[in-house]
Image (tube, rainbow, N blue to C red):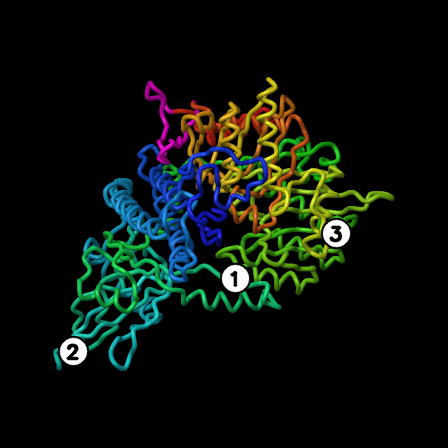
Amino acid sequence: DDDAAEGDGRAGTPARARPGGAGRTGERPGERGELPEDRFLDRERSWLAFNERVLELAEDPSTPLLERTRFLGIFASNLDEFFMVRVAGLKRRIATGVATRAASGYQPREVLEIIWNRTRELMTRHAACYHEGVAPELAAQGIHLLRWPELTEEEQIRLFSLFRRKIFPVLTPLAVDPAHPFPYISGLSLNLAVVVRNPTTGHKHFARVKVPPLLTRFQEVSPQRYVPVEDVIAAHLEELFPGMEVLAHHHFRVTRNEDLEVEEDDTENLLQALEKELLRRRFGPPVRLEVEESIDPDVLDLLVRELKISGNEVYKVPGPLDLTGLSAIADLDRPELKYSKFIAGTHRDLAEVESASPPDIFAALRERDVLLHHPYDSFSTSVQAFVEQAAADPDVLAIKQTLYRTSGDSPIVDALIDAAESGKQVLVLVEIKARFDEQANIKWAHKLVEAGCHVVYGLVGLKTHCKLSLVVRQEGDNLRRYAHIGTGNYHPKTARFYEDLGLLTADPEVGADLSDLFNRLSGYSRRETYRRLLVAPRSLRDGLVERIRREIAHHRAGRPAGVRFKLNSLVDERIIDALYRASQAGVPVDVWVRGICALRPGVPGLSENIRVRSVLGRFLEHSRVYAFAAGGESEVWLGSADLMHRNLDRRIEVLVRVADPAHRSALTRLLATGAADSTASWHLGPDGEWTRHAVDANGEPLRNIQETLIESRRKRRVGNA
């Protein structure tokens, strides 16, 4: 996920709003009305409900087995990030006294209690799914995830050789006694708490052994027979403590606050400040301690005392701990246990039917705009090819590009470097504060600077999250601008399993808008209005609220009216209140949300005209689309922005208005299909509970929208052959 658990940095909402009030919604005159106090769902509970939906896919026997394994790993990874960011941020605000009541009405401490209880339930379900469902079924398919006692004697002997050669040399046992203080336990590291006894004195001692993170998590001991690496270490502890008696060992894992805090206003060099903060991240306070159920109470007491962690933050689960490593098992070459293979094809408007040569993207864009839908349309033959063609074209004078996240071996970065080295003007806006990608982005920033690119880090106090690429090309006596505006990152690897939309265009208005916006990002331009863009933090929230209001006017005048949103998260109170008022006026509202939703649908008198759906599956739904019936002249916007405080107030986000009527129709149909009762999805109720709808009244599977889109691309390719 782009930012599944990323904190919004706010202290919370002032005291619960009085009826008609909206706390921190930033209301404008004329927007007040009698709305109930309890109209907002809690965002943390909503996020946990999202991760529960991920878990349901792992629990679902109709999901291919290795994909169930992958969803178990995704659930664990999601929860790690949630604790590192959301729980850590909440604890920090409580500790510093700045946490106040949430928009949902909960006090900060109440939210923390809810999180502790709910995550404990979910982690118990997660472990049960692994032990009682996925692991036995993998074994039935010849893929065995074993513990040390389950190995054959021959396998254990083989692992002893492996231990001596590849594991023992990188282990560092750390004793704890008056001369050796309790060691620092790094976040998300897997550890062994070891109790040994000196046979001479009879004294017991505690030691800690860290499982090096570079070791393969599940060691293959025989073909498709795997054992956790910590079990291999535990079986050979005598090698680490010669002359001592090993009495017991227990696995444990600590999650720490890994959110970054850099005060840009007081920092002359943001890059240097961030590099220092990354070093400090490793020493954030603990927010969760995971231990195996069998841990000795005395050892647990020692860990709790030394880590200064509360009992509520201790999670006892069946081993093995840290199932994020299941992603490696899910990658096994067993295609019959996975989703059927799908290879994206080149978009039909870019395809060269009669030629094996790559398409001339600039020529195609002079004919028409191209609406891309990844991963159904290939990223490499569209967006990546657009940047690469620009870099190689001698008529291209300049390339301007935003980079929020990209891959370690990014062809996009390579193309930008090639362009700069060939003498083109290359401006790259690198967002070095992209959470958990900071280190990689710092590295790319240095590399781009060395190649001669102009690298900037955006505006002080704002993350640059928009997905933009602008190419300026000499054509005869004129300059023509070509642009890409997308909903997803310029990341070739994630583009294969993130669902995203993008617009490639040579439209002069869009080109002029992007020129103005890049000038603002790299210089001192104060432009706030654009021709075909809505840009946060200035115009995006107001622009959407105004369009929701217009739908009310259209409905009252008897014209077609309706609102359809597709996004990752809906939290912003002012937008939600606008949707409530539209519902009260009779305007139908469909919201297709992947993750967090603070809106309560289906409340009589408030939101009975609002439906909220969520789709999860083989691809991560990531696109953001905002569509309005607009009295019959549909208006559709796509771009980078979710409807959260951080997106609308503290980021540069961009939505572009889709001009081509065929593209607007295609996007409107997509949103209608996602919200349809005939499509498999989860439905949100007014109480905040999500209910899965996967089969119809006759028990037949409902339409899987992702598989439907895959099939439509396959048929189109066959038809064009």
Can you identify the residue that label 1 sits on? 439
Image spot of residue 454 (x, y percent) = 69, 60
Say few, some or many: other residues with alpha carbon within 10 Å of mark 1 (under 14 / 14 to 19 / 20 or more): some
First along the sequence among labels 1 and 2: 2
Q: CA distance from mark 2 to mark 3?
A: 71 Å
Q: Secondary structure at mark 1?
A: helix
Q: Is residue 593 left or right of residue 457?
A: left
Quarter assignment of residue 513: top right
Query: Would you say the residues marked 3 and 1 are in contact, meaning their CB atoms lie under 8 Å apart?
Result: no
Query: Which residue is drawn at the image coordinates 67% and 40% (left, top)?
Result: 533
Q: Give residue 114's mark.
A: none
Callout in the foreground (1, 2): 1
The span shown in magenta is 678-701
Quarter assignment of residue 521: bottom right
First along the sequence among labels 2 and 3: 2
Q: Is residue 443 left or right of residue 593?
A: right
Say few, some or many: other residues with alpha carbon within 10 Å of mark 3 (under 14 / 14 to 19 / 20 or more): many
Image spot of residue 277 (x, y percent) = 50, 66
Foreground residue, 484 or 328? 484
Can you identify the residue that label 2 sits on? 198
Q: Amino acid at mark 3?
A: Ala
Q: Secondary structure at mark 3?
A: strand
Q: CA distance from mark 1 to mark 2?
A: 44 Å
Q: Give residue 398's mark.
A: 3
Instruction: Evaluate whether residue 295 shows in this view.
Output: yes
Q: Main secondary structure of the magenta part?
A: loop
